[in-house]
Amino acid sequence: MPAFVATYRNSRGKVTSLTLEAADALAARRDLRRRGIQAESIERQAAAPGRAAPAGSKQTATLSQQLSSLLEGKPGIRDKAVFASKLAALVDAGVPILRSIELMAKQQKLPLFKRALEAIILDVNQGVALGPAMRRWPQVFDKLSIAMVDAGEAGGVLDESLRRLAKLLEDNAKLQNQIKGALGYPVAVLAIAILVFLGMTIFIIPTFAGIFDDLGAELPLFTQLMIDLSKLLRSPFALVLVGLLAAAVVVFSRFYATPIGQRKVDALVLKIPLFGDLIQKTATAQFCRTFSSLTRAGVPILMALEIVREITGNSIISDAINQSRDDVTQGIPLSLALASKKVFPEMAIGMLAIGEETGELDKMLAKVADFYEDEVAATVKAITSMLEPAMIVIVGGIVGSILLAMYLPMFSIFDQIR
């Protein structure tokens, strides 16, 4: 069966290639859609002279599967952690790997994840190792999960590698939830404040404006400004403003989708007070925890750096790790390579250097990860405690300004009555 090379963009927008076997290009594209991959191009791979293309499994995609793949979401980090934890327990209990995956497939509720497990069962049943079988489903299993499984199979400690993977994914999910909590609270409160302001400006101020006009009251400057703003928001020009705002969002998203735009925005984010420090600490904790787990599982250091680079969530830090990886290939110690990039705290770099000198790099990085995970929790708590009163003041200021604009004319009305 001929082989095809497909190129697509992963969740971070990076162009990635995947080799698969199919009867023709159309069948290859259908196979990719079934896996949840939207290919940008598919080219047939030339077979090596004197060698036959290896046999592989090929699932027939029905029309309903193709349509459903467009509506299905990819499994989250929590789903992957639960899968790794359950699979580790089954393997540790002595259940054969094929039977373990069959049990996991029956319990899986996510359609895309379920189809991936069913395809993996067929591959493993034909003699394919679990790691390579998982690698055929990049929309379901990331490089981190595949590397941990490969290392576990190579060392005969698959159950231990899966337990480490589950713990690692759970820790990463916890960090992500802390960041979402810290960033989501002010955004939600600010959105509510804006909606309250728009509601009162559009619906309440016109009512009071009509009353003041009937009474012939002299309007203060602040009240007149609020009434003019209300008229503006109720005029067709407001649609123009909404269109401009939507266009600005689209332009920004497209700019951020470019490598240059992403680097510029990520560099500015790291300089934001409090939040930039929080993102740096989070990236440090994720780097240390993931790199420690990978090296302890026996993953080569260069491959571990390549995997860790993709989970930092910031292109500036990812570029620094990638450049450090190139330095390591030239014989430069990792601690010196990272120190020259100045993206991680000095304490983390110092502990990394000690780990390299003592030969216990994984243990030292695990301790650094514990420290910075606690630092992230403390920073999130500090940011939340600072933002709560600030948001209350903002909401109170918005509501109070509108009430002030409505009550100021009443003083002149009272003077006329007297």
Image (tube, helix red, strand yellow):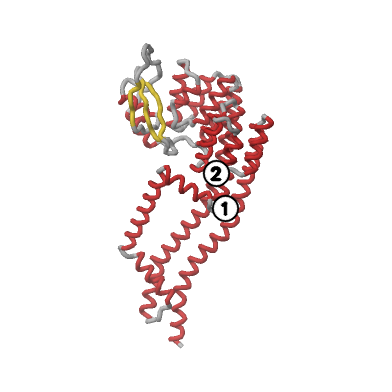
Q: Position of residue 178 (x, y in %)?
A: 56, 45
Labelled pair 1, 2 in contact (Cβ < 8 Å): no
Between discs 1 and 2, the one toward the N terminus? 2
Instruction: Tell me the quarter of the picture where residue 2 sits.
Output: top left
Q: Secondary structure at mark 2?
A: helix
Work out which residue is located at the far bottom of the displayed protein and give it: 418
Tell me which residue sits at (58%, 53%) in the image.
384
Image quadrant for the N terminus? top left
Q: Position of residue 280 (x, y in %)?
A: 56, 45
Residue 166's place in the image compared with 178, above or below, is above
Please state which of residues 19 and 223 is positioned toward the viewer in this rendering: 19
Distance from Cα at disc 1 to Cα at disc 2? 17 Å
Q: Position of residue 132 (x, y in %)?
A: 47, 22
Residue at the disc numbered 2:
177
Q: Is residue 167 visible?
A: no
Q: How many marks?
A: 2
Tell me which residue sits at (45%, 33%) in the image.
110
Please state which of residues 339 and 226 is positioned toward the viewer in this rendering: 339
**Number of the label disc, if any, that sits on residue 119:** none
Work out which residue is located at the far top of the displayed protein and give it: 50
Residue 326's place in the image compared with 255, above or below, is above
**Number of the label disc, if any, that sits on residue 274:** 1
Q: Is residue 105 visible?
A: yes
* Badge 2 amino acid: Asn
Q: Secondary structure at mark 1?
A: loop
Tell me which residue sits at (50%, 48%) in the image.
267
* Badge 1 amino acid: Leu
Tell me which residue sits at (56%, 54%) in the image.
273
